[in-house]
């Protein structure tokens, strides 16, 4: 059997089904002359005329009517193969959870890039600053700013960062004296409840370690609201450099006492055991770990 004949048979079936050489060419993604050439080759290989052509179109010959059912099977098989390949493309929904700040600043740009590679994958985003029951909530992938142990889940570090002191220029300009470690506790503070239990601020540098409870503070349980309060001049607070970088460059935030740091913070990717993970989830895990 000449394999090239199969191509010519598919072209012949497309011409008949579409009722036009031009429409068949568009369907197959080839040129109009290429359609005519394939049909001519098939007729030469079979030594019969398959179509009667005239200025108004064409009609099937008796031989063409006999060949058409077989040619139609070839064309159908090619279409079925394309459909199988499409179905093997990663598709379906991935359910993710992250806090507002990590979702906005780290996750969302990466999901966009992933979707450009795999456009049939959908995301179900659960954005919350509260700790969720990952299994109960049906979570496929979670982003956590700590290595929180979850039964049945794997935790892998994505990046490490450190808390640093930031404030808005407007707040700093309202102060009557220069900031130093001696008067740091007298400033207005914005504290994140999860990172500062007992409202205690812990800072460290080459000079040692300092712990204190501010005289005045706002307390929140949302990293995103913490960020917004600091950005809007409500006081001084601790942010990770990864989150504050863009606003620092634009002048919306100022680094305070750059020699002093807060606690180290790591971002972890949590997901169920890789055993029997859907392909779309495995691909996203690998993509997030690589980027």
Image (spheres, grey):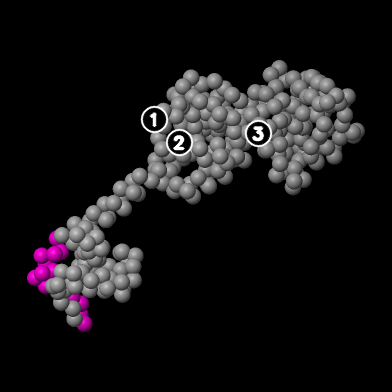
Dot 2 and dot 3 residues touching (CB under 8 Å): no
Q: Which element is circle 3 on? A: helix
Q: Which residue is mark 3?
A: 225
Q: As displayed, is residue 253 above or below residue 6?
A: above
Mark 2 is surrounded, within 10 Å at the Cα level, by few (under 14), some (14 to 19) or many (20 or more) other residues, namely some
The verdict on residue 268 being magenta is: no
Nearer-N-terminus badge (1/2): 1
The relative height of residue 199 versus residue 176 in the rendered view (above or below) is above
Residue carrying label 1: 276
The magenta-colored residue range is 55-69
Front-most of residues 64 and 213: 64
> Alpha-carbon distance for marks 3 and 1?
38 Å
Distance CA(mark 2)–CA(mark 3) = 32 Å
* Mark sitting earlier along the chain (2/3): 3
Q: Nearer the viewer, mark 2 or mark 3?
A: 2
Q: Is any atom of residue 2 visible in this view?
A: yes
* Residue depicted at x 11% and y 67%: 65
Would you name the residue on which mark 2 appears?
282
Q: Quadrant of the C terminus?
A: top right
On the image, which quarter does residue 227 sit in? Answer: top right
Q: Secondary structure at mark 1?
A: loop
Q: Is residue 126 left or right of residue 54?
A: right
Mark 2 falls on what kind of element? helix
Query: For mark 3, does the 10 Å Cα neighbourhood hold few (<14), some (14 to 19), or many (20 or more) residues?
Result: some
The foreground one among 135 and 33 is 33
Q: Residue at x 23, y 71 (%)?
A: 41
């Amino acid at each position: 059997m000449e394999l090239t004949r199969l191509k010519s048979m598919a072209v012949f079936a497309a011409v008949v089904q579409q009722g036009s050489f031009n429409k068949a060419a568009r369907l197959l993604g080839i040129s109009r002359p290429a359609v005519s050439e394939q049909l001519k080759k098939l007729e030469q290989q079979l030594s019969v005329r398959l179509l009667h052509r005239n200025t108004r179109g064409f009609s099937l010959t008796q031989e063409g009517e006999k060949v058409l059912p077989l040619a139609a099977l070839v064309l159908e098989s090619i279409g079925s193969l394309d459909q199988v390949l499409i179905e093997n493309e990663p598709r379906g929904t991935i359910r993710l959870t992250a806090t507002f700040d990590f979702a906005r600043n780290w996750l969302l740009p990466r999901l966009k890039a992933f979707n450009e590679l795999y456009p049939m994958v959908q995301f179900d985003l659960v954005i919350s600053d509260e700790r969720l029951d990952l299994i109960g909530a049906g979570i496929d992938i979670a982003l956590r700013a700590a290595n929180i142990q979850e039964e049945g889940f794997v935790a892998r570090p994505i990046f490490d960062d450190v808390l640093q002191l930031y404030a808005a220029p407007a707040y700093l300009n309202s102060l009557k004296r220069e900031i130093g470690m001696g008067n740091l506790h007298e400033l207005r503070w914005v504290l994140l409840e999860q990172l500062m239990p007992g409202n205690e601020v812990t800072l460290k540098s080459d000079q040692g370690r300092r712990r204190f409870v501010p005289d005045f503070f706002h307390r929140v349980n949302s990293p995103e609201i913490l960020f917004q309060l600091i950005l809007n001049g409500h006081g001084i607070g601790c942010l990770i450099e990864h989150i504050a970088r863009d606003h620092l460059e634009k002048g919306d935030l100022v680094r305070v006492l750059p020699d002093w740091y807060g606690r180290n913070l790591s971002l972890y990717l949590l997901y169920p055991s890789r055993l029997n993970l859907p392909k779309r989830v495995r691909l996203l895990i690998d993509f997030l770990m690589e980027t």
